[in-house]
Amino acid sequence: MAQEKTIWENLKPDEEKKLESVSSGYIDFLCRAKTEAEAVDYFIERLLKAEFQDLEKLDKLKPGTKFYLNHTGRTLAAGIVGKNELKNGLFIIASHIDSPRLDLKPKPLYEDSETHTALLKTQYYGGLKKYQWVNVPLALHGRIFTKDGRVIKLNLGEDEKDPVLLIPDLLPHIAKMQHDRKLFEGIAAEEMNALAGSRPGDFKEDKFKGQILKILKEKYNVEEEDLASADLALVPAGKAREGGLDSSLVIGYGHDDKASAYTSFRAFQDISEPEDTVLVLFFDKEEIGSQGTSGSQSNFLEYVATVLLHKLTGHSDNFHLLSLLRKSNAISSDVDAAMDPSFKGAHDEHNAAKLGSGIVIAKYSGYGGKFEGSEAPGEFVAYVRRIFEKHDVPYQFGTLGKVDEGGGGTVAQDFARHGMNVVDAGAPVLGMHAPFEIASKADLYSCYKAYRAFMLH
Ligand code: MN
Ligand code: MN
């Protein structure tokens, strides 16, 4: 049965420890993996320790073979060959590992001599409320690729001794020019400029910008133009932590969708010798529509499935691939909206997910008249309910908000396209897409149990 009570009220004494272990592991993950590339690094480090092998380098696959495939360091698949090999299709859990943030523009650095400052121009990535991202300490994460083939990894602003960046908002005393702006327009995109420096260097012109370039040269041996061949982003600086006076919550950057990525990976780590072949997928670019080589609209899944088919059965033709994908089953593991206690009016109270009531099964996504969403067939929702109940997983049903309030999509449609069964299911989150978001430890634990149950089915 879907939950009426909270998970806390039904928690068995021996489950408390596991719940705390999942949430403390998750907090550590959130601190280490703020970008898709950092998440892929985190997962691969653990897969290698557990003796997973590169799928492309494996000759022969057999039940129990543990494999992974890394695409561009931004998208990842990991799996275990089941006893039934591919007879019943694949059991897939797919999440995304990118989160809303502020990317640096290709020519980010400029000087404003009038205000004695050097600044970095940003471009927001994903659907965020820009006004939330000003006056928040920001860390610089990413990689710079130089012409001579060097890769410089940056992670600046997380260590207590590191400096952080900040986009200053106008002080309230003289903010009359902002009074008539609507909330969402309080800060315009071209006003999202982060302070990079205020100390002049010994140069004839561009003294402030020159000083920053000098530091970049000395510290990382990079030129200004190298910033154009880079993936650099500003993300909220600081650690994820426990939240609430009762420590029932986790507050951190990137619950969307690291909560699903971590709990599905953790569940996957606890599986051995599955009946059917399981696959966990971690995609980039979901926050901007899943396009691109590392997004779920790419042919990454088809490629992984083709390699698996070829190495298990000797077949790699289109007929066998399409047949495999059509009989596969997937959970699109993505977070949902928890009903906001101060803005209940945005939700349909009867269909809103509640914090602490477990993983949210979202039968469909999209906006308005279900436009641009993906809907799971009723019989597949029934199948997932049966699995969850068999494995004692607390869950709830939910829709994102009032029909005419807005909406959103997930990677589900890119799986449904192949004719497979797929449903969205993930943790309810408060304050989604804000620099710091809120999730319940109980829901994270429910997600862990749910994803594990699906893989075992
Ligand atoms: Mn998401
Ligand atoms: Mn999102």
Image (cartoon, grey):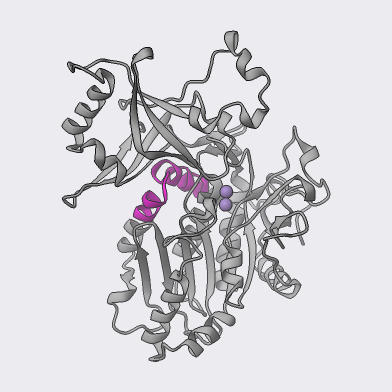
On screen, 109 above or below 404? above
Q: Is residue 334 magenta?
A: no
Residue drawn at x 47%, y 53% is 97
Nearer to me, 371 or 7:
371
Horizontal arrangement in the rendering, residue 12 relative to residue 143 (left or right): right
Q: Quadrant of the C terminus?
A: bottom right
Q: Is residue 35 magenta?
A: yes
Residue 224 x, y percent position in the rendering: 25, 36
Q: Quadrant of residue 247?
A: top right
In this picture, which residue range is highlighted in magenta? 20-42
Q: Quadrant of residue 184?
A: top right
Residue drawn at x 48%, y 37% is 240
Residue 47 x, y percent position in the rendering: 35, 62
Residue farthest top in this picture: 173
Residue drawn at x 44%, y 28% is 193
On screen, 141 above or below 164? below
Nearer to me, 431 or 266:
431
Residue 393 x, y percent position in the rendering: 66, 61
Horizontal arrangement in the rendering, residue 360 relative to residue 435 (left or right): right
Nearer to me, 276 or 17:
276
